[in-house]
Image: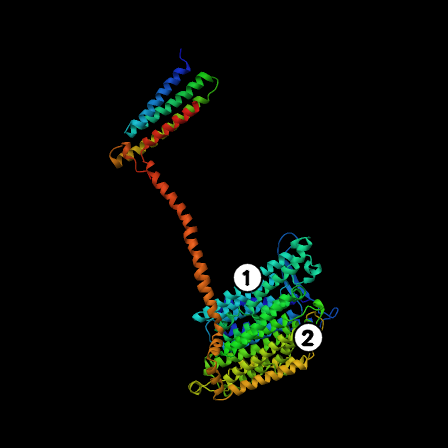
Amino acid sequence: MNFTYTIFILLLPFFSFLILGLAGKWLSHRTAGIFGTLVLGVVTVLSYFTAFEYFTADRVDGVFQTLVPYNFVWLPFFDGGLHFDLGIMLDPITVMMLIVISTVSLMVHIYSFGYMHGERGFQRYYAYLSLFTMSMLGLVMATNIFQMYMFWELVGVCSYLLIGFYYTQAPAVAASKKAFIVTRFADLGFLIGILFYGYYTGSFSFDFTNTAVYLNGAMPGVGADFSKAIAGAGFILPTALFLMFVGGAGKSAMFPLHIWLPDAMEGPTPVSALIHAATMVVAGVFQVARMFPLWIQYAPETLHIVAWIGAFTAFYAAAVACAQSDIKRVLAFSTISQIAFMMVALGVCLPEGGYTDNHASLGYMASMYHLFTHAMFKATLFLCAGCIIHAVHSNEMEFMGGMRKYMPITHITFLIACLAISGIPPFSGFFSKDEILVAAFHYSSAMGWIMTGIAAMTAFYMFRLYYGIFWGTENVEYHEHHTPHESPAVMTIPLILLTVITVTVGWILPGSFGSFVSATGEAYHIHLDWSVAGTSIVIAVIAIALATYIYSGVRQPIAEKMKATFPALHKWAYHRFYLDEVYQFVTHRIVFGIFSRSFAWFDRHVVDGFFNFLAWGTNAASYSIRTLQSGRVQQYAFVFLLGVLVLILMLII
Amino acid sequence: MITINCFLILSALMLFIGVYGFLTRRNTLAILISIELMLNAADLNFAAFNRMLFPEGQEGYFFTLFSVAISAAETAIAIAVMINVYRNLKNNFVENLDKLKW
């Protein structure tokens, strides 16, 4: 089986980007949209075909083979040593990501056709969408960490371009800059991690079995010195992996690098769906999953730190989401929380039995599974939010309420997605979240209960959002002079398709996600642990019931009372615990105010001063001797004569 | 008996008369004449060395001829410059020609 056609999965969106980007000016909106969508349709078909071919191919020793259809050396360093390669690698998680990215991206392409209708820069928008999709596809198909880094940065650029799509509006510009700077700052860690890793293992490749470090713990970078090699294996690799994780934390919005994500809502809503579901924030999770064999073998303690960072992020984001009034912001914080769930799942994997025990590494499968299901229902939620915003022309919940009468399709799809994210069977989120909880309990019961609690918070704030939009207090006055209406078919069809996936994927593939993707590659049969599943269902139902009790009525006395009883807590949560202000303080007062100012003083007075002194000295010396040049020829001749005489005298004597 | 010393004394006299004239004359024409004196002192040396020390060779004579030709050309240019200076300044005293400084 050769998969050489997979190169087109990368090339087609890239050409689409070039054509739409360069010739977009002369294309009509309609042509540009249809062209972009069609190209992406072909990419989706190719991805599905790849997945079909890949997963129906024979396993070798019960493991799906890792295939490398293309690989060539791009930049060689030191003869026969380190080199950057470019290529395409296919393994189960890559193929799964191909499906996720192409599906969500196609839905967003179709949806945008309605949502962005008549916007200025429509062709530019589609060009960026193509580039964004291409970058993320390249990221997951990379054969080595450096190629991944390249596409990783491309993803960052695309997010910058798309978040700042409405570049005439100041908040969008600020948000795009913030996203770019924060993720770039985190990527510095990633780059340092890569260099550490490459220097000590002598390879950038994801094929870990060929690196010296994997074979026997020897590291070419430290030579034959045994004690150094031991120290290296104990310190260097965990450090390198953790630095890479810092990059991943920036992209995946882990605390405290999450601050860019809520602001990224300034972009068009379909772009938010794309960023949150498939293309950007899952990159960090994917990166950790990609380096997973090394994590579990050499840095399990560091991996548990990742788990605790994830757990804290999940809790923080869920707490903030409970108090937001902007619907996209609630969804943004729910994304942070859910991505943190995936990080936790990866982090709680135990090194027992090394890399070969599927059961100890259950979290790996759970994380990928949740990534898959989350992409589908989060895309649904965002696209629904887009429909709602399209209908009421505002992000604020106070303009909504009672929308179920006006938008039945959006209502139903949103409800199903909410049930899925809350973990109610038989929707997809239940199955994946349950696996995460099982993995968390397997690690420690404390982690298990924490994550169960956060899952309950998820259910609560999602239903708070749901009731706030579709039930609750209707803004009758606003709706009267501006009646909301259901979106056109081009926007609702993607919603329905994504909802169908959300509803079916959990039980159509009963237990079989694990047979496609697992830590070792061997089939792992998911069997529900009813003690965990039952608890989480009960808690989720209680949380939903609580949300129903508080928020579903026209009058909401309890919500008002809660707000009145804990004004400080509500205010803190509403302002995201003032983390943006902390960043503002650190960057402006401390970094700019103290460090930058003193550096600027040094530069201006000491560095510049030295060179100004040199210039001034030359100038002053020249001024003082310039009268020697009198312009009188005879005087020159006389001096010349004297000089000659002196020379002659010197020669004679 | 005319020895080489006679020529050398004569040419040294011519050279220093030229130097003195160059440094003291105000008129550019006189300065030009002084330069010619110095040049001719050198030419005289060439010819004398060739005649007295290497009578079988010709190089000294040829060099003298070259020098005479070049000094003729130089004089032509110098006089042309002086004529233009005179037209602009209505005199040709060297102390007025000090604009080319700083």
The colouring scheme, among rainbow, by chain, secondary structure or one colour, is rainbow
- Judging depth in this view, the residue of A283 and A71 nearest the camera is A283
Residue A464 versus residue A247 in the image, above or below: below
Residue A410 in the figure: left or right of residue A646: right
Along the viewing direction, whichever of A609 and A5 lies nearer the viewer: A609
Q: Position of residue A619 (x, y in %)?
A: 37, 44
Residue A267 visible in the shown view:
no
Chain designation of label 1 = A
Nearer the viewer's eye, disc 2 or disc 1? 1
Q: Position of residue A541 (x, y in %)?
A: 59, 85
Chain letter of the residue beneath label 2 in the structure image: A
Tell me the kind of residue under disc 1.
Answer: Leu
Q: Residue at x 46, y 59 (%)?
A: A595
Figure quadrant of the N terminus of chain A = bottom right
Between residues A455 and B38, which one lies in front from this camera angle? Answer: A455
Pinpoint residue B28: horizontal percent, then vertical percent: 29, 30
| Position of residue A624 measured from the top left corner of the image (x, y, whole percent) | 34, 40
Whether labels 2 and 1 belong to a single chain: the reply is yes
The amino acid type of the residue labelled 2 equals Gly
Q: Is residue B26 left or right of residue A150?
A: left
Residue A188 image label: 1
Q: Is residue B61 above or below residue A7?
A: above
Query: Label 1's element?
Result: helix
The residue that appears at 65% across and 52% down in the rendered structure is A79
Cα distance between the residues tagged 2 and 1: 34 Å
Element class at badge 2: helix
Q: Nearer the viewer, residue A242 or A558?
A: A558
Task: Name the outermost residue toward the right.
Answer: A61
Which residue carries the number 2 mark?
A514
